[in-house]
Image (tube, rainbow, N blue to C red):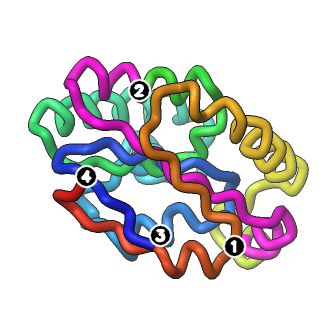
Amino acid sequence: MILALPAGAMVVLIGASGAGKSTFAARHFASTEILSSDAMRATVADDAADQTATEAAFDLLHTALGLRLARRRLTVVDATNLEPWARARLLAAARRHQRPAMAIVFDLPLELCLERNRLRGDRLVPEAALRRQHGRMRASLSALPDEGFEPIWVFSSPEAVEAARPERGLG
């Protein structure tokens, strides 16, 4: 599947931990195009897993997002992005800079996310938290079309993720 990405678009990745968002981003986008909440935590606290640094990390992420969108640079936001208020803040930045806002949802089976999480040595997410994340992701699917993302791509299997081909400058 071709994912047509206009120049300077904001692409928001949405999904539970272990769904493959960061792997997808690293495979298809330049490191300079990706704003990762984990990388921002590492920047501000020297530890990507330090949840006490989350507020500062997202302040940094939103600052970088605004600067990139103002320069009309393709920007991929790699975080769980499960809460409507968090997505609204991202959409507000895209509107402020008159940039297209797209969403890629990783609606992969919970068991797959749990298995991938168990294989993570460094940033293991507690199982109960991952289950809550997965539930929030599923609950947000019906509301996403009304939030302002256009288009919204939903991947429901690893095969769908593998078949996706982002192409810049289209749309």
Mark before the other along the chain sequence, 3 or 4: 3
Q: CA distance from mark 3 to mark 4?
A: 21 Å
From what the image shows, is residue 152 above or below residue 27?
A: above
Which residue corresponds to mark 1? 157
Determine the secondary structure under disc 3.
helix
Name the residue carrying label 4. 171
Secondary structure type for disc 2:
helix
Quadrant placement of the N terminus: bottom left
Label 2 Cα neighbours within 10 Å, binned few <14 / some 14-19 / many ≥20: many
In this view of the protein, which residue sits in the foreground, 106 or 21? 106
Between disc 3 and disc 2, whose residue precedes?
3
Q: In the picture shown, does residue 108 fall above or below 93?
A: below
Which mark lies nearer to you, 3 or 4?
4
Using the rendered view, name the quadrant where residue 32 is placed. Answer: bottom left
Q: According to the image, label 2 marks what residue?
A: 91
Residue 124 in the image, given as x and y percentages of width and height? 73, 62
Q: Is residue 44 above or below residue 49?
A: above
Q: Which residue is mark 3?
A: 24
Q: Amino acid at mark 4?
A: Gly
The residue at 26%/55% (across/down) is 33
**Residue 77 image position (x, y, % from top left):** 41, 46
Q: What is the x, y in percent for residue 125?
A: 75, 56
- 130 relative to 77 in the view: left or right: right
* Residue drawn 41% across the image and 43% down it: 102
